[in-house]
Image: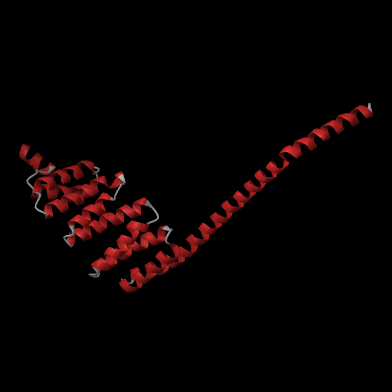
Amino acid sequence: MASHLDLEEQEQLDQLKAFWKRWGNLITWVITAALAAFAAWQGWNWYQRDQAAKAGAMYEEFERALTAQDADKAAAAAGDLKARFASTGYAAQAGLQAAKLQLDKGKADEAKQSLAWVAEHGSQAAYRDLARLRLAGLQLDAKAYDEAGKTLDAIQSKDFEALVADRRGDALLLQGKRDEAKAQYQKALAGLPKEQDYRRIVEAKLSTLGVPTVVEATGAAQ
């Protein structure tokens, strides 16, 4: 009986050896690759957390300059974020806020540069599209209508469709194209939620073009 069991064990051992001889290297490589991938994933997560922590600390420095309304220091801090942590949301946020401060201080050209960077390098599509929308407004102020049109063309998010239409309406109106501007404003109004306060601004633009607002239309009916 013992001999029979020994033979069975020997047969199983021989089968295992044959299996390992055929597949052992592959199994070893698969396990090694899986462990390496896991280690890389862990390392990447650590790197991301480390980058976010460092970027956050630098962003606090930017916020101090922003609170002090120091455009030069804010621009310098934003520049550091762009140089060292361009892939983080902190860099994009700093670029957008720095542009607003620069514009408030009358530095339109510098504001354009800040917005152009976010439009090109922002970490998320929403940041890039918001920067483009604001940049197009500055380009319209400078009467750079073709540039503004190209900037608006680059906005792809459906969330910005109504605001893009409103901005296109501004561009067309500035060029004396009243009917085309009216059509864009109507498109913008149709795309804005009814509870959105910005609707009033679009309605006011339409009113100047002879299109009655909801309030005017209601009053006329009475």
Looking at the picture, tell me which residue is in the foreground, 221 or 212: 212
* Residue at left offset 52%, top offset 61%: 50
Q: Indicate the position of residue 140 as horizontal and vertical percent values.
A: 18, 58
Left or right: 115 in relation to 222: right
Q: Quadrant of the C terminus?
A: top left
Left or right: 162 in relation to 35: left
For the rendered model, the colour scheme is secondary structure
Q: Indicate the position of residue 77 as horizontal and vertical percent values.
A: 39, 69
Q: Indicate the position of residue 196 as horizontal and vertical percent values.
A: 24, 47
Left or right: 155 in relation to 17: left
* Residue at left offset 30%, top offset 44%: 158
The vertical placement of 5 against 84, above or below, is: above
* Residue at left offset 6%, top offset 37%: 221
Q: Is residue 222 visible?
A: no
Q: How many marks?
A: 0
* Residue at left offset 65%, top offset 44%: 30
The vertical placement of 17 against 66, above or below, is: above
Q: Quadrant of the N terminus?
A: top right
Left or right: 191 in relation to 98: left
Q: Is residue 113 visible?
A: yes
> Image quadrant of residue 24?
top right
> Image quadrant of residue 7?
top right
Q: Indicate the position of residue 41 as horizontal and vertical percent values.
A: 57, 51
Looking at the picture, tell me which residue is in the foreground, 157 or 151: 151
